[in-house]
Image: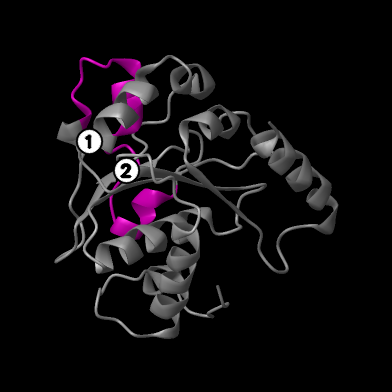
Amino acid sequence: IPFFDIPDKEKVFANPEDRSVISESSRMLMSNIRYLEKNDSKSNVILVTSSIKGEGKTLSALNIALSFCSIGKKVLIIGSDLRNPQLHKYINLDKQTPGLSDYLVDNKTEWKKNILNTFDNQTLNVLLSGPIPPNPLNLINNGNFDILLKDARKIYDYVIIDSSPTLLVADTKSLFSKSDVILYLTRCNVTDKNIINHILYMIYNIYQP
């Protein structure tokens, strides 16, 4: 994805008819991801992650979701960074807006009630991270996330998970086994070369038999 020296909100691929460099590069990434899809899945769960903050996880996850919507797919994007959420910034909402954490704390809370439709003429649903909890790792591993994904697979063509960075917290590692495709990002002039060994280690642990 090329670098654009414009405000982040202007980098969002919001218009499905857009033919800008931003939209075309997002479509190209989407096309490459489709080669990794599992044909035996009702829908495909795509995890977007990286090593550290500031590498473009949230923007990439959102633009990938919007790219799938531009070809008529129904998509859910989930903000799963329960420590430092960013997705709310792109849709101008408060980060305390009810979302994923509310459901993970109590699965009697219907997660579908927290779904947002913030993009006009788009088949994109958004589930924000919700209020920041004191125990994110425990919540991600308490079984409720699995229930949510099982339900979401029946409704959506794609589920995009915007996750936390792998080098800073252990939360995202718990989501690897729940995902069909993992997109691991690096960013020019941001990702330190010394982190490459960490990335290779993560990839090895994801894909080893």
Horizontally, is 191 left or right of 111 in the view? right
Q: Nearer the viewer, residue 126 or 89?
A: 126
Q: Name the residue: 37% across, 55% down.
A: 89
Relative to 99, say whether 123 is above or below.
below
**Image spot of residue 124 (x, y percent):** 23, 55
Determine if the magenta segment contains residue 102. Answer: yes
Q: Residues within 10 Å of mark 2 (few under 14, many from 20)?
A: many
SS under mark 1: loop
Q: As drawn, which residue projects farthest toward the front? A: 40
> Where does label 1 land, which residue?
154
Q: Which residues are magenta?
A: 86-111
Q: Nearer the viewer, residue 170 or 176?
A: 176
Asked if residue 168 shows in the view, the reply is no
Horizontally, is 28 left or right of 68 in the view? right
The CA distance from mark 2 to mark 1 is 7 Å
Determine if the magenta segment contains residue 29. Answer: no
Horizontally, is 177 left or right of 186 in the view? left
Label 2 close to label 1 by CB (< 8 Å):
yes
**Image spot of residue 9 (x, y percent):** 38, 68
Q: Name the residue: 22% across, 29% down.
A: 111
Relative to 93, say whether 101 is above or below.
above
